Image (cartoon, helix red, strand yellow):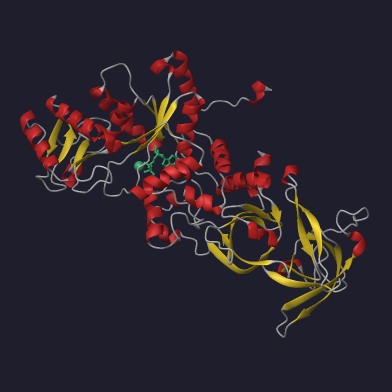
């Protein structure tokens, strides 16, 4: 049992297991999750979070949360707070909380040290001029005319950059490595730029800010990170990461960067910049709009931490980028909600059904099973009366023979109540169905000894007397393009699905839902999985459709 349930380790788990066995880093594992606080976390970040925290904690190690706050232009405390909340909601707790800005002093000292060792220089050229001299992968770059400045001049100029003597963009500090290096990142990479911006933590103390390549590896080193896990686009940066650490290190210890594939999901935008644009332009209601791929959006939509963990586990970690089908994510939440969501009745497009032989004014309360997948979930009572609402599409006046819902002369079961025989309907002048009539068959009451009369269909209903009015928001994919990355020439705003949200204002739900609390999950029987939206008030219930009942992915997966 033990053996067969043991999963094979992914390539990163194998590396970690090997390192721990060898006693590397004193047999310790320390990781970090390093978000830039310039937006809300998305489901792609959840993939990194589950790995960074998961692998450290499974192996008795530590995982730090480190805000990579080296660019004051785009960063904000609002983002810091939301990132913490989302990580906690996913079920993780960081061992230490750090900010890259905690290391500004140390990084600055290290930069001075590099200048003194002839490994860094101040370049007076603009970013554009520097970019032009970079060369190509097959031809060497051009050395800057400022490359061979003496140490004293470099120290003096760098000090002046920090003192605020120069304008933004007028000078940078560069590492002096090799303008002909086959790895373009080694062609005298930028270490510092001038930014005269107030920083959300260090205020106006700094006029120079380190760039990613200079800050990240060093921050890992200062923190004692053993395994620095990141996405594949950083693979080409790794030699430079190692080079900077080599200049700094004064012991055998060094952090090791390992890259894995980024998560992309069909019909989703997975970029903070683009998500910010959607929010700013009012294309969505906010970062937590239930159509957004953000963690807070998914939470509001009705996703659970468990479903996200299961999803991340099912897709795994590899060295190859690809795109995961949205149906895989939907399958994970559907599976979890099937286990935990109480079943209730709701009618999205109501039409009246009159049980003509049922006494007026009479109410009977029948027992409804909360969740057939979970006996301990118990039951609740649902009313039955003469006047009901059913779904408009559950009646057809002239139905084909395979139609197993209501049609004159045929029987269906009303869930938890009786079998009814449909008799007729009333139409308005335009031919729209106004009311449907039926007769109930008393001896067919659900749960009674002789209740198992054979009928092919069961439909849900609510009583007109007890039901509550609700708003329901139906969501569809945010983009109408499966893989937006492939559509290089198109503006992503043109790929937005104009029908990504549909609001139904006349939904009838059973009365027990007045006790629902924001984010509570339900299965609206025969309709889908829903949760109570945070916009909901006792006088105006609002539900989100988390996911429909139909599972396309599950059927595909069964065949695999
Ligand atoms: P975006 O491109 O959305 O702005 P980012 O990579 O700039 O994302 P960071 O805040 O720098 O965002 O990311 C923090 C960590 O999360 C990094 O280690 C990054 O590799 C990881 N990460 C970001 N996006 C994804 C993704 N789609 N799949 C897996 N990991 C991701
Ligand atoms: Mg980034």
Position of 334 compared to 535: left or right?
A: right
Quarter where residue 417 is shown: bottom right
Q: Is residue 262 above or below residue 344?
A: above
Q: Residue 68's x, y, as percent?
A: 33, 39
Using the image as rendered, state which of residue 224 and residue 378 is in the foreground. Answer: 378
Q: Quadrant of ligand 1?
A: top left
Task: Determine the residue positioned at 24% across, 24% down.
Answer: 248
Whether residue 274 appears in this view of the structure is yes
The residue at the far bottom in this view is: 429
Q: Is residue 182 above or below residue 390?
A: above
Using the image as rendered, state which of residue 248 and residue 162 is in the foreground. Answer: 162
Q: Residue 90's x, y, as percent?
A: 51, 41
Whether residue 144 appears in this view of the structure is no
Position of 480 compared to 350: left or right?
A: left
Q: Residue 391's x, y, as percent?
A: 72, 67
Q: Quadrant of the C terminus?
A: top right
Q: Quadrant of the N terminus?
A: top right
The residue at the far top in this view is: 22
Position of 538 compared to 418: left or right?
A: left
Quarter where residue 557 is shown: top right
Using the image as rendered, state which of residue 318 and residue 309 is in the foreground. Answer: 309
Using the image as rendered, state which of residue 202 and residue 159 is in the foreground. Answer: 202
Q: Residue 5's x, y, as percent?
A: 65, 26
Q: Is residue 42 above or below residue 424?
A: above
Task: Determine the residue positioned at 59% across, 48% down.
Answer: 330
Task: Determine the residue positioned at 21% across, 38% down.
Answer: 135
Task: Determine the residue positioned at 49% across, 28% down.
Answer: 57
Label total for image = 0
């Amino acid at each position: 049992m033990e053996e067969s349930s043991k999963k094979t380790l992914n390539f990163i788990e194998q590396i970690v297991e090997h390192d721990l066995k060898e006693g590397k880093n004193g047999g310790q594992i320390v990781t970090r999750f390093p978000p830039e606080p310039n937006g809300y976390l998305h489901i792609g970040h959840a993939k990194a979070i589950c790995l960074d925290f998961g692998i450290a904690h499974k192996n008795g190690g530590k995982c730090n949360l480190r805000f990579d706050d080296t660019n004051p232009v785009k960063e904000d405390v609002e983002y810091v707070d939301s990132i913490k909340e989302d990580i906690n909601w996913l079920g993780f707790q960081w061992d230490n909380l750090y900010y890259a800005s905690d290391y500004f002093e140390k990084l600055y000292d290290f930069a001075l040290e590099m200048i003194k060792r002839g490994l860094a220089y101040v370049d007076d050229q603009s970013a554009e001029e520097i970019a032009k001299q970079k060369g190509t992968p097959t031809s060497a770059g051009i050395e800057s005319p400022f490359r061979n400045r003496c140490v004293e001049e470099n120290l003096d100029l760098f000090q002046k950059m920090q003192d605020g003597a120069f304008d933004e963009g007028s000078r940078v500090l560069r590492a002096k490595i090799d303008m002909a290096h086959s790895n373009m990142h080694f062609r005298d990479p930028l270490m510092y730029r001038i930014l005269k911006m107030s920083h959300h933590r260090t205020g106006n103390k700094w006029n120079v800010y380190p760039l990613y390549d200079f800050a990240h590896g060093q921050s890992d080193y200062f923190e004692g990170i053993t395994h620095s896990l990141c996405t594949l686009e950083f693979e080409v940066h790794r030699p430079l990461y190692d080079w900077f650490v080599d200049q700094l290190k004064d012991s055998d210890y060094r952090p090791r960067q390992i890259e894995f594939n980024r998560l992309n999901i069909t019909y989703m935008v997975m970029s903070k910049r683009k998500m910010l644009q959607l929010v700013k332009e009012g294309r969505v209601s906010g970062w937590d709009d239930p159509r957004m791929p953000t963690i807070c959006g998914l939470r509001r939509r009705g996703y659970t931490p468990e479903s996200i963990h299961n999803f991340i586990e099912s897709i795994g970690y590899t060295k190859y980028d690809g795109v995961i089908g949205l149906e895989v994510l939907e399958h994970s939440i559907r599976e979890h909600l099937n286990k935990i969501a109480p079943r209730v009745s709701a009618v999205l497009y109501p039409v009246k059904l009159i049980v003509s032989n049922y006494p007026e004014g009479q109410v009977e309360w029948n027992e409804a099973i909360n969740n057939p997948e979970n006996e301990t979930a118990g039951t609740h009572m649902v009313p039955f009366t003469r006047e009901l609402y059913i779904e408009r599409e559950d009646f057809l006046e002239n139905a084909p023979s395979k139609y197993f819902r209501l049609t004159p002369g045929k029987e269906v079961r009303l869930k938890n109540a009786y079998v009814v025989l449909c008799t007729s309907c009333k139409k308005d002048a335009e031919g729209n169905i106004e009311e449907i009539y039926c007769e109930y068959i008393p001896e067919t009451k659900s749960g009674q000894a002789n209740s198992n009369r054979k009928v092919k269909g069961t439909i849900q209903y609510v009583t007109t007397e007890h039901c509550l009015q609700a708003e329901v928001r139906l969501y569809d994919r945010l983009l109408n393009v499966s893989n937006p990355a492939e559509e290089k020439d198109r503006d992503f705003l043109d790929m937005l699905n104009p029908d990504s949200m549909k609001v139904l204002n006349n939904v009838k739900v059973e009365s027990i839902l007045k006790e629902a609390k924001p984010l509570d999950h339900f299965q609206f029987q025969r309709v889908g999985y829903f949760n109570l939206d945070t916009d909901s008030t006792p006088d105006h219930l609002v539900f989100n459709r988390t996911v429909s009942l139909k599972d396309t992915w599950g059927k595909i997966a069964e065949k695999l």
